[in-house]
Amino acid sequence: MSVINAYSNASLLFFIYLLFIMYQISLSVK
């Protein structure tokens, strides 16, 4: 179960990181 927990935590962090990049790109486009 710990492996699945670590995987879900990593994918969640990666998703937040992608959202942050998209936000920065949208700011720089303006």
Image (cartoon, rainbow, N blue to C red):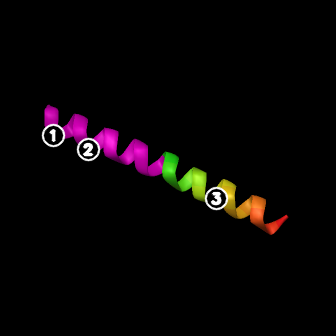
- Quadrant holding the C terminus: bottom right
Q: Indicate the position of residue 28 as horizontal and vertical percent values.
A: 76, 65
**Residue at figure coordinates x 32%, y 45% from the top left:** 10
Q: Earlier in the sequence, mark 2 or mark 3?
A: 2
Mark 2, residue position: 7
* Viewer-closest of 29 and 2: 29
Q: CA distance from mark 2 to mark 1?
A: 6 Å
Q: Are marks 2 and 1 in contact (CB under 8 Å)?
A: yes
Residues tagged 3 and 1 counted as in contact (Cβ below 8 A):
no
In the rendered image, residue 12 lying in the magenta stretch gets the answer yes
Question: Is 18 located above or below residue 1 in the figure?
Answer: below
Label 2: element kind: helix
The segment highlighted magenta reads 1-15
User: Mark 2 to mark 3: distance in Å?
Assistant: 22 Å
First-in-chain label (3 vs 1): 1
Query: Which residue is tagged 1?
Result: 3
Q: Amino acid at mark 1?
A: Val
Q: Is residue 28 magenta?
A: no
Q: Secondary structure at mark 1?
A: helix
Magenta stretch, main secondary structure, is helix
Which residue is identified by label 3? 22
Amino acid type of the residue that numbered disc 2 sits on in the rendered structure:
Tyr
